[in-house]
Image (cartoon, helix red, strand yellow):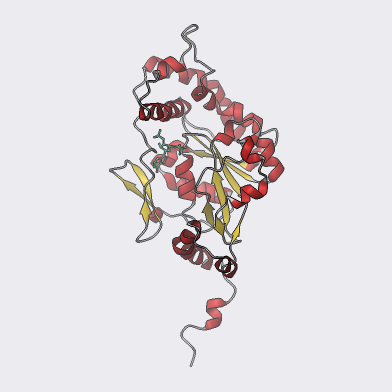
Amino acid sequence: LQPLCPIDGRFGPRSQDEIPLRALQFKRGLLHEFRKGNATKEQIRLHNLVQQLPKAIIIGVRKGGTRALLEMLNLHPAVVKASQEIHFFDNDENYAKGTEWYRKKMPFSYPHQITIEKSPAYFITEEVPERIFKMNSSIKLLIIVREPTTRAISDYTQVLEGKERKNKTYYKFEKLAIDPNTCEVNTKYKAVRTSIYTKHLERWLKYFPIEQFHIVDGDRLITEPLPELQLVEKFLNLPPRISQYNLYFNATRGFYCLRFNIVFNKCLAGSKGRIHPEVDTSVITKLRKFFHPFNQKFYQITGRTFNWP
Ligand code: A3P
């Protein structure tokens, strides 16, 4: 008689299709325990777990949807995320601690999985491209962008909320974004400067070829996440595993949320998806006009065109 469940079949060489299941089980249970620091050396050895340097980094852009992108990619069985922003390359004190310190900040994973971290400050910090290049010159770099004026307002909203939490007053967006002396866009305002994507990208291109970057449409990730995630899977050479099942629209939240399996699903924290203050339309128009030529250059360099005004 043929055995119903041959031992050889269960422990034989793994096909591509078997990896996700094993990794998913791992993600659900073991990994969670290990992250809480409950792993013994024996367990780590037994499961052949390693802390790997990231093969891909979400380098920015702040308020582009970096958290949503990381969490959504983490739905993929072959992806393991670093939960915290590590700020290794942009923070001199952290950087001085060395690559081994950085690696030790990474979660445990199976060797076939890839680790991804996100620190949006990387995109705009002068020293970062060279530092990342020195660590791994063939690393894959993800940049998630949104329409620049909306991103600047989102950036302002985050700072405003921080001030309000401390019972502090803050300027109106209009006052910060427009120089009162010239009535022109205030290019010294950080929220404006961060949205000049092409200026920052050009610095990165001194170290990495454009093929090593993938641009994610952050506005589309909000309304229609799956096709954006499928493009990232392709860029990372991952088999397509994220499906519509993994993403469901939560009307109360007004955003897509994540479904890992029948019992485990989650939405992003309330700090993601804030209500923006109303901004004077003439200021919006001025900002859009200001960003326009930079956007054109960004489309030209990246080969990805958006219908930003
Ligand atoms: P707003 O707060 O302006 O709406 P980051 O993680 O880089 O700080 O980006 C935050 C932005 O992610 C939010 O900006 C929100 O619009 C966007 N986002 C994209 N997908 C989301 C999702 N599924 N849930 C919550 N926020 C999401």
As drawn, is 104 to the left or to the right of 249? Answer: right
In this orientation, does residue 87 appear? yes
Task: Identify the residue at horizontal 38%, vertical 56% (top origin).
Answer: 245
Instruction: Name the residue nearer the viewer: 97 or 151.
Output: 97
Tell me where residue 77 appears, x and y as whole percent: 50, 59
As drawn, is 22 to the left or to the right of 247? Answer: right
Tell me where residue 263 appears, x and y as whole percent: 35, 60
Q: Quadrant of the C terminus?
A: top left
Whether residue 128 is situated above or below residue 99 in the rendered picture: above
Instruction: Name the residue nearer the viewer: 47 or 297.
Output: 47
Task: Identify the residue at horizontal 35%, vertical 61% (top origin).
Answer: 262
Tell me where residue 13 appears, x and y as whole percent: 60, 73
Instruction: Name the residue nearer the viewer: 309 or 78.
Output: 78
Tell me where residue 205 appears, x and y as whole percent: 67, 33
In this orientation, does residue 286 appear? no
Instruction: Name the residue nearer the viewer: 257 or 299.
Output: 257
Whether residue 74 is situated above or below residue 185 in the rendered picture: below
